[in-house]
Amino acid sequence: MYYSVTNSDVLIIGAGVIGLSCAYKLSKEGLKVILADPNPGKSASWAAAGMLAPVFEVKYAESSHVPFNIEARRAWPSFAKELTDLVNCDIDFKEGGTLQIAKSFDDLTYLMELAKFCRSLGFKVDNLSPREVRQLEPSLSPQISGGFFNEVDAQVNNRLLVDALIKAVKILGAEIILESIRELKIEKSRIIGAKTDNEEFSFKYAVICLGSYAKNFPYIKDYLTIFPIKGQILRLKKPEFFAERIVRAVVNSRTLYIVPRSDDEVVLGATQEDTGFDDSISLGPLSDLMNDALLVAPFLYDSAIRDITVGFRPNTVDNMPVVDWLPAENLAVSCGHFRNGILQAPISAEIITKLILGQKAPEAYNYVRYKRLNPNAN
Ligand SMILES: Cc1cc2nc3c(=O)[nH]c(=O)nc-3n(C[C@H](O)[C@H](O)[C@H](O)COP(=O)(O)OP(=O)(O)OC[C@H]3O[C@@H](n4cnc5c(N)ncnc54)[C@H](O)[C@@H]3O)c2cc1C
């Protein structure tokens, strides 16, 4: 069969927030970039809540992740400004911190352990009584047992973000092909081409940004173990009287977050289910999430449900992404960003851009190299 061949400096396979951010940075450097994706920006990057939470998404066993996340958080203000200046669209980037609260005394015990852990990492965390919590956010339930506030977290509207990135890469001259890549052509240690059903690509470099879908992708699946963690998440109409900050809550030993946007929307999330690529909306996990939310934020009771989305967080064995060359000499990957892909998109794109330009990568690169998972790799 005859295929037309399209040439570029870089082919990016997968146009979620990770691939789009790479395309944006590489195009800004003057490289000719092609992105291939049948449905750009509509997978995990569309489902997400958009919290930029470098520390408080981290679990106890993950303290080594904090330095990478802190670098990721630092990259955000300038990234947001440059992007919005270019496309002239708002992405609702806000630096308001997060209020962490607990429903019962058992939940508070868990939360205070988290506060202790955060202090051990050097973060200033002040405990709050129920009254102090309600002074900050009067719409929350009086039936809570306490909490604390962290100033570090920010948020962005991830749907506006992916739309802005799509617009930006087009302005910068990148091309988006709305097709799946089916096959890579490999010769010795180089990737010499890639194919969709209709088209063939040749390029100097390829970057795999497939999120969870790297799990089954040819060649990559032999080197990298990625597995999807399902999340169900709701978008609701924001009540007139409601919290202004992100609220994270521990309720009945489960965690949830409520992310109020600047407009009339509030995001309520999210379930975490290890059920493969099952994209069904399921009653049990969702009703737990909704009931828990109403116990701490009763004003949500009359909120209209606008959207329930299922997304797959791309996980690795150590919950950290791989942003590096893979054994082929002109193939890079930026995959496995799990719960923090929106936060980590700008810094990951910065690393990929430096690798491709042959320049010194930022320090953060050392946390996301492939060889940590495979010490025998070069
Ligand atoms: C419910 C939920 C809430 C979350 N909340 C947050 C949050 O608050 N903050 C945060 O930082 N992170 C959050 N995350 C995590 C974040 O969404 C992900 O880490 C991030 O979106 C991963 O981006 P990605 O571009 O790697 O993957 P994706 O967005 O999944 O993109 C992968 C792309 O690959 C494409 N693709 C698949 N197969 C092919 C093929 N063969 N050829 C070409 N393209 C292909 C798909 O169409 C898709 O567009 C959340 C995730 C979920 C599910």
Image (cartoon, rainbow, N blue to C red):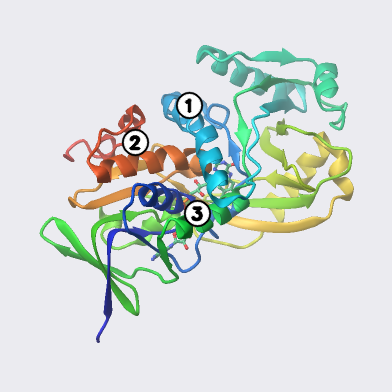
Q: Earlier in the sequence, mark 1 or mark 2?
A: 1
Residue 138 lies, in percent from the top left, at 87, 28
The image quadrant of residue 113 is: top right
Q: Is residue 237 above or below residue 104?
A: below
Q: Is residue 83 visible?
A: yes
| Residue at (58% x, 28% y) in the render | 56
Residue type for callout 3:
Ala
- Marks 1, 3: nearer the viewer: 3
Q: Which residue is mark 1?
A: 70
142 lies left or right of 235? right
Q: Is residue 201 above or below residue 366?
A: below
Residue type for callout 1:
Ile
Q: Earlier in the sequence, mark 2 or mark 3?
A: 3
| Residue at (53% x, 48% y) in the render | 86
Residue 226 lies, in percent from the top left, at 39, 50
Q: Which residue is mark 2?
A: 368
Residue type for callout 2:
Val
The answer for how far apart the CA atoms under marks 2 and 3 are is 26 Å
**Which of the pair 315/44 is nearer the observer?**
44
Q: Which residue is mark 3?
A: 168
| Residue at (88% x, 26% y) in the render | 142
| Residue at (70% x, 40% y) in the render | 259
Q: Residues within 10 Å of mark 2 (few under 14, many from 20)?
A: many
